[in-house]
Image: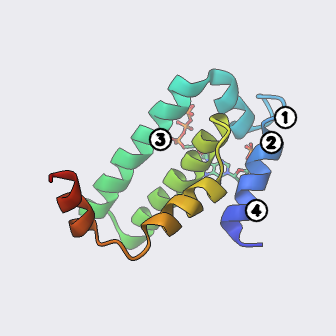
């Protein structure tokens, strides 16, 4: 099992823990607005690391984004499988061609 699939399963399991014992459970207890805020903050921190942080900083922020994204997907009843299916649907379609098709 790859680490993303494993982490997704851990997140699904930790949601049932007591918020005082689990960061995942505490995020869920605080609700979608807090999960959304954390996701946004991690995105901004990753952008800052990209521009002015070390490689280690950027990798750390990327991990934070992925973790919080998995928490967000779970909170909406979605999964990595849904994201994988969307990426597979897009495979081989140039971003430039896709953009041009939207402006026609
Ligand atoms: N991968 C992660 C992971 N990445 C980041 N984080 C936490 O995400 C938080 C984000 O950092 P911040 O500094 O922005 O947060 P903060 O200001 O301390 O917290 P807030 O009060 O603002 O939410 C930190 O507390 C990190 O420890 C994670 N917490 C948990 N996991 C995984 O989730 C599993 C379950 O964790 P628990 O639910 O805590 O048992 C763990 O075993 C890990 O595998």
Q: CA distance from mark 3 to mark 1?
A: 21 Å
Residue that numbered label 1 is attached to: 17
Residue that numbered label 3 is attached to: 39
Q: Residue furthest front?
A: 104
* Neighbourhood count class around disc 4 (C-alpha, 10 Å): few under 14, some 14–19, many 20 upward: few
Residue that numbered label 2 is attached to: 14
Contact between labelled residues 4 and 2, with CB atoms less than 8 Å apart? no
* Neighbourhood count class around disc 2 (C-alpha, 10 Å): few under 14, some 14–19, many 20 upward: some
Residue that numbered label 4 is attached to: 6
Mark 4 or 3, nearer chain start: 4
Q: How many numbered callouts?
A: 4
Q: CA distance from mark 1 to mark 4?
A: 17 Å
Q: Is mark 1 within 8 Å of ligand 1?
A: yes
Q: Is residue 37 above or below residue 39?
A: above
Q: Is residue 69 left or right of residue 27?
A: left
Q: Is mark 2 within 8 Å of ligand 1?
A: yes
Image x and y of residue 40, in percent: 41, 39
Q: Nearer the viewer, residue 96 or 64?
A: 96
Mark 1 or 4, nearer chain start: 4
Task: State the SS at label 3.
Answer: helix
Q: CA distance from mark 1 to mark 2?
A: 5 Å
- Tell me the residue at 71%/63% (across/down): 5
- Tell me the residue at 61%/23% (across/down): 31
Image x and y of residue 25, in percent: 74, 33
Contact between labelled residues 2 and 1, with CB atoms less than 8 Å apart? yes
- Tell me the residue at 68%/38% (across/down): 77
């Amino acid at each position: 099992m790859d680490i993303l699939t494993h982490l997704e399963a851990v997140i699904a399991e930790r949601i049932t823990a007591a918020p005082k014992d689990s960061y995942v459970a505490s995020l869920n207890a605080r609700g979608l607005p807090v999960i959304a805020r954390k996701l946004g903050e991690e995105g901004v921190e990753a952008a800052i690391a990209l521009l002015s942080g070390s490689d280690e900083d950027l990798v750390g922020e990327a991990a934070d984004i992925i973790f919080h994204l998995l928490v967000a997907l779970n909170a909406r009843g979605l999964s990595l499988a849904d994201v994988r299916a969307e990426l597979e649907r897009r495979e081989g379609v140039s971003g430039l061609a896709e953009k041009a098709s939207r402006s026609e």
